[in-house]
Each structure stands twice: as structure tokens, then as C-alpha cells.
Image (cartoon, rainbow, N blue to C red):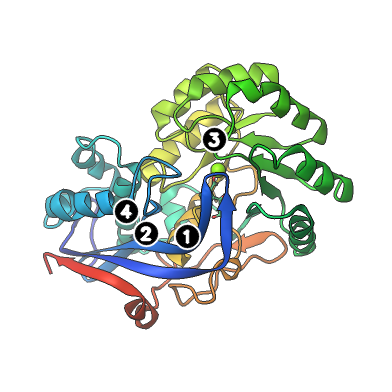
Amino acid sequence: MTASFSHGLKIDSAELRLVRLELLTPFTISTGTMVEKIIPLLTLRANGIEGYAEGVMDPLPDYLDEQIAGSMALLRDVILKQVVGARFENPQALEPHLAPWRGHYMTKAMVEMAFWDLWAKSLGLPLKTVLGGAGDAIDVGVSLGIGPIEETLERVRSHVEQGYKRIKLKIKPGHDADLVEAVRREFPRVALSVDANSAYTLADSAKLARLDGFGLDYMEQPLAWNDIQDHATLQQRIRTPVCLDESIRSARDARKALQIDAARVINIKVGRVGGHAESLKIHDLCAAFDVPVWCGGMLESGIGRAHNIHLSTLPNFSKPGDTSSASRYFARDLVHEKLEAVNGRMPVPEGPGIGVTPDWNFIEGITLSAESFGA
Ligand code: OSB
Ligand code: MG
């Protein structure tokens, strides 16, 4: 039953599902509006234990260049066939099996993260402990989608009252300085950031420099999703620290960004960078450069949310993350446990692994497809 270090874990079977979960309120960013989440869910089984992860890719490649259909095909036709029946000494041992496939960081992250959950459970330890983190709760902020300024002010008010430790405003050309000014006027001291999701170019440098006057903690991904170099140029032109999200897919990307001062803050999304092992590498590298990191989100259900919370207990996650209360996003979550922040602090789920259990009755009812491997 218990797996010892020397024998690793053999993955006996897997299940890959696609579920549809409605968002309570539409979420608008510079690239478009989301009204529902289509979530790929992966279960890996070993020795009667189950590990879980969800994919953060979208139906269309509008945030990054990965999409659900391609991910599902790669998992189904290649990766799950490869890993089911195979034995892995530890989570890092998965890497050489996933490395041959270019890109697909979100796809690989699903397998890697589900294995970490399985691994932690097989050792009887919380995920945070096997990742090297500690603590019972993490600081969290909120990410507020694009909407009318008055409405956004009202939402800022409500989240500041709830104790969230940082407010992130989504911006785009034509919806930036006026918004930030209005929020700053009413909340002169609240920790504030903006996220453009790649909506600007270097030609907008002067416009972006005007945001320097508002004491923003950082400006997230103002320029192209695949352009680290231009962010370094922009950083020379503005005082607000540049934070990279989309542009960092790996520790190698992070190194390049840090070496040329393209990012003074990095948003780590474990699902975006291929999993926890890569997240730890980025975390450590940033610490060596004295650059703080924080944990971003992709409107995850409780499964991905729990992974994010555990990762956020590492020491260089020194800025509040986006892992806010699940009840802000969904009427009902995919897990039994309530992931709710109290005064801007999100409790770390207790128990082995990610510490949350899927609500299979609910999940069955919203499942679009389900496939088994090696069962
Ligand atoms: O850029 O961080 C982003 C949501 C979807 C796609 C991209 C982003 C976001 C968010 C929301 O900012 C973070 C969250 O609340 O999970
Ligand atoms: Mg972002």
C-alpha cells in the first residue's frame, strides 16, 4: 500500500474528463470575455490512491498558444499512453518523458501536478510540505475584470472591505489611466496593480509611463505575450516595475527576463509553466535575483486552486496572489471543501496532497466527455 522512496510510484490508470462550469459573472480581459470554464480534469491512480489536476488552457488560443482540443489529443494519443503503466521515482522523473514534446506547458502541467498530488498522498504529506513550503494560510488579492469605471469602483470597495491584500485592475488601451486615477482617488493606499494581457506595444510607452504617478505595485504583461525583449526596453522607460505573466513559460524564460531586467516581479502560474517542478525552479531563480514572485490564477476550480494555494506557501511568494475565494467565481465548486479567504488570507487545505476531494456527483452532471486509460 505505501510506496517507499526507492520504489517510486507506478501509475496504474488515468481518467481524463472535460467539464463545463458556469462563471457567476462574466470575466473580461483585454483579449475577450469568458462566461464559462471548460475544464480538462485529470485523475492519476497508483496503489489505490488518486491524484488530481486541472488544465488551465482555454477552448481557443487567446491567452496563450495552447488550446483544449490540442491538449486533449496530446494527452489521449501520446502522453497518457506513455505514463500509464510506467513507474516514476519522484515527480521530477516525469520531466524526461514530457520533454520531447514542444510547448504544451499547460498540457504537461496537468500530468505533472496530478503526479505531485499522488506522490504527496503516497507519503502521507500535504503538497506544501513536499514542495518545501510551510504555513497555514497565504495572502491573497483579487483580479477584477474590465467593466464600467463606476461598477469597478464598487467592486474595489467591496473587496477592500473583505480584506483582500491587493487589487489588480485589468486594463486595455482606452481603459487605463482614467480607471487607475479613479481607484487611486478613493483608495490612496491600497496595494494596486494593473494587468494588460499584452494589449500594448512599445509605441504606447509614453501612455504607460503616465501610470507611474499612481504608485502601482507593478504592471503585468503590458506587451506581447511572446516578447521578453520589448519588456526590457519598456522597463527602461517607466518607473513602475514590470511583472511578466504570459512571457514566462519556463525557468529558461525567467532567466532570460531576469538577465535583461525585463521583469522586476514574476507571476508564476503553475499550470502555465508546466507544473510544480518548473515553478520551484522559477521561484528559486527569482529569489537569487532578489525578484519577488506571486501566484497567478486562471479562474481555476477547487482542484487547480488548491494546487496554487500549496505552491504559494514557498518563501519567495512574497506578494499576494490571485487565488481568491472560489465562491467569487462559481455557484458550486468541483470539490467538497470551501476554498474561502478570510481577511485576505486563504487557508491551506489540510490533509495529504492537495487536501481537497472532487465532488463526483456534481462533476458527473457537468461532464462533457470522459475517457479511461489502463483501467
Ligand atoms: O492574466 O492573470 C491573468 C484570468 C484569465 C486569464 C488570464 C488572467 C486571469 C486573471 C484572473 O487575472 C486570475 C484569477 O482570478 O484566477
Ligand atoms: Mg496576467
From the image, tell me which residue sits under label 1. Answer: 300
Task: Tell me which amino acid carries mark 4.
Answer: Ile
Q: Secondary structure at mark 2?
A: strand
Q: Mark 4 to mark 1: distance in Å? A: 15 Å
Where residue 362 is drawn, which disc sits there?
none
Q: Amino acid at mark 3?
A: Ser
* Quadrant in which residue 243 is drawn: top right
Q: Nearer the viewer, residue 81 or 171?
A: 171
**Tag 2 and tag 4, C-beta contact below 8 Å:** no
Q: Residue at x 35, y 68 (%)?
A: 19
Cα distance, mark 3 to mark 1? 21 Å
Q: Residues within 10 Å of mark 1 (few under 14, many from 20)?
A: many
Say which residue label 2 marks.
54
Q: Secondary structure at mark 4?
A: helix
The three-letter code of the residue at mark 2 reads Glu
- The Cα–Cα distance between marks 3 and 2, rounded to whole angstroms, is 25 Å
- Distance from Cα at disc 2 to Cα at disc 4: 11 Å
Which badge, 3 or 1, is on the more N-terminal residue? 3
Which of discs 4 and 1 lies nearer the camera? The answer is: 4
N-terminal of the pair, mark 4 or mark 3, is 4
- Crowd around label 3: few <14 · some 14–19 · many ≥20 (10 Å): many
